[in-house]
Image: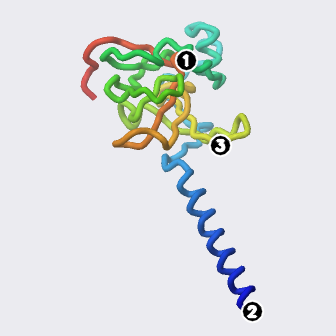
């Protein structure tokens, strides 16, 4: 009887530990069902092809990812603001950019809460949180829970989805 009880206690302990680990690994950001969203800067796919380079189109409209350490902005340290390549909406400020060592521009906070939206991404055999432009729905990258304080988030963004402007950005 004691052996059965000890086994049951161990089972409960393992179950509790598994629930804790799974919940701590999940992203706390609210995921949007972006299929039904209407974006203020929406265009047809034909129109996007006219204004984006082929690679920008692959990243922003098809969800491709550039190779690490190859993007134009992964090592940029200048003061300024980052905008969506597709629609021009404000996305991130340079003072929220940090060197995560991952090979993509990384930020700990978006320009505003409306600058980006989140979507569940189950591609590549993983479950991740996709980051999309709040203005046009273009794929920017992904967000992870391993960033620095104050937010503890790492927005890992493709350079192809960004346009950088040096200097002091406009007020929020």
| Quarter where residue 137 is shown | top right
Q: Position of residue 47 (x, y in %)?
A: 60, 12
Q: Real-space Cα distance between discs 2 and 3?
A: 42 Å
- Front-most of residues 29 and 172: 29
Q: Which secondary structure, mark 2?
A: loop
Residue 69, numbered label: 1
Q: Residue furthest bottom?
A: 1
Element type where label 1 sits in the image? loop
- Which numbered disc flags the more N-terminal residue, 3 or 1? 1
Image x and y of residue 154, in percent: 47, 36
Q: As rendered, which of 24 and 52 lies closer to the eye?
A: 24
> Which residue occupies 48% across, 41% down?
146
In space, the residues marked 2 and 1 are separated at their CA atoms by 59 Å
Nearer to us of marks 3 and 1 is 1
Foreground tag (2 vs 1): 2
111 left or right of 28? left
> Where does the C terminus fall, quadrant-wise?
top left
Q: What residue does disc 2 label?
A: 1
Residue projecting furthest to the front: 3
Q: Secondary structure at mark 3?
A: loop
Circle 2 Cα neighbour tier, 10 Å, few/some/many (<14 / 14–19 / ≥20):
few
Pick whichever, 44 or 60, lies toward us: 60
Name the residue that disc number 3 marks: 127
Sequence order check, earlier mark of 2 and 1: 2
Vertical arrangement, residue 4 with respect to residue 129, above or below: below
Residue at the image position 34 percent from the left and 42 percent from the top: 150
For the residues labelled 2 and 1, say whether their Cβ atoms are less than 8 Å apart: no
Question: Which label number is shown at residue 87?
Answer: none
Crowding near pointer 1: few (<14 within 10 Å), some, many (20+)?
some
Q: Position of residue 62 (x, y in %)?
A: 66, 23
């Amino acid at each position: 009887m004691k052996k059965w009880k000890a086994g049951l206690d161990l089972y409960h302990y393992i179950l509790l530990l598994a629930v804790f680990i799974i919940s701590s690994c999940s992203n706390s950001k609210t995921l949007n069902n972006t299929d039904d969203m209407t974006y203020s800067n929406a265009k047809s796919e034909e129109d996007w092809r006219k204004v984006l380079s082929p690679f920008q189109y692959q990243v922003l409209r098809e969800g491709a990812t550039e190779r690490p350490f190859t993007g134009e902005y992964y090592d940029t340290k200048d003061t300024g603001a980052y905008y969506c390549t597709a629609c021009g909406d404000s996305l991130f400020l340079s003072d929220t950019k940090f060197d995560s060592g991952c090979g993509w521009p990384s930020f700990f906070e978006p320009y505003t809460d409306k600058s980006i939206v989140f979507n569940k991404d189950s591609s590549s055999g993983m479950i991740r949180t996709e980051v999309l432009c709040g203005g046009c729905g273009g794929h920017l990258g992904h967000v992870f829970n391993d960033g620095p304080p104050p937010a503890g988030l790492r927005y890992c963004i493709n350079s192809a989805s960004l346009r950088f402007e040096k200097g002091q950005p406009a007020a929020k």
